[in-house]
Image (tube, coloured by chain):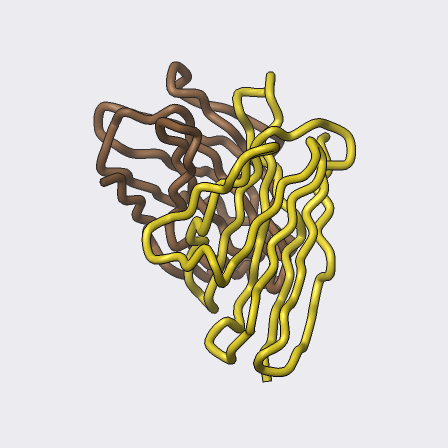
Chain colours: A yellow, B brown
Amino acid sequence: GAVVSQHPSRVICKSGTSVKIECRSLDFQATTMFWYRQFPKQSLMLMATSNEGSKATYEQGVEKDKFLINHASLTLSTLTVTSAHPEDSSFYICSAQKQGVGEKLFFGSGTQLSVL
Amino acid sequence: KQEVTQIPAALSVPEGENLVLNCSFTDSAIYNLQWFRQDPGKGLTSLLLIQSSQREQTSGRLNASLDKSSGRSTLYIAASQPGDSATYLCAVGTGGFKTIFGAGTRLFVKA
């Protein structure tokens, strides 16, 4: 099946620093990738839709200047959490859509971000 | 606005039992419905994908059904095993390829 790689799996950083999370589709091209955020025991909340070669589309309430998304190629999207604060601590997951399989979503393994 | 609800929120069953997880959605105009499994601190694994034109999908001990008109889907797990313990998420694909997730059902299968 299709594979989506997400890196790093866990990161701890100090308040005020920036953290970059990478999401790669390893064996298929993904023109569209999605970034989600998940709080403990809650479901995934869509943050933004990442489109290759164009600006990301952010969901209501998500600060685009804080969560920078870059989709520079058909296999890579990055999410940068800028000037991180403790309230940004969360589990971030990306997914990629593979064309031709009913728009099935394939997910990365997630990144646990802890901001001290 | 599409809303997805999963019942029960948590379930504990003895090994070998058959069980049903429920998912309901408010807007029947869906593109597809997908069931995922999530292990603690991990990403999601797709279990079954049902297109809007389909009624059910089967994979091994898993069977998922879809009734768009009533806004419901069920995930049936036969002969449950301790390794099935995880959180099961229902996700509805909507127009624009957005996916709305339920809050999940946390399943614990006791050996």
Which quarter of the rendered picture does the C terminus of chain B lie within? bottom right
Q: Where is residue A97 in the image (x, y as percent from the top left)?
A: 58, 31
Viewer-proximal residue, A31 or A28?
A31
Viewer-proximal residue, B111 or B36?
B36
Q: Position of residue A57 (x, y in %)?
A: 44, 41
Residue lying at 42% horizontally and 53% vertically, measured from the top left: A45
Residue lying at 41% horizontally and 43% vertically, measured from the top left: B20
Q: Where is residue A56 in the image (x, y as percent from the top left)?
A: 50, 42
Residue lying at 56% horizontally and 67% vertically, measured from the top left: A82
Viewer-proximal residue, B79 or A50?
A50
Side (left or right) of A27 relative to B37: right
The count of marks equals: 0
Q: Where is residue B33 in the image (x, y as percent from the top left)?
A: 42, 31
In this orientation, does residue B97 appear? yes
Residue B61 quadrant: top right
In this orientation, does residue B13 appear? no
Considering only vertical position in the picture, is A98 above or below A12?
A: above
Side (left or right) of B10 relative to A81: left
Considering only vertical position in the picture, is B12 above or below A15?
A: above
Residue lying at 70% horizontally and 35% vertically, measured from the top left: A73
Residue A81 quadrant: bottom right
Viewer-proximal residue, A87 or A105?
A87
Which quarter of the rendered picture does the N terminus of chain B lie within? top left
Side (left or right) of B48 relative to A43: right
Considering only vertical position in the picture, is B78 above or below B52?
A: below
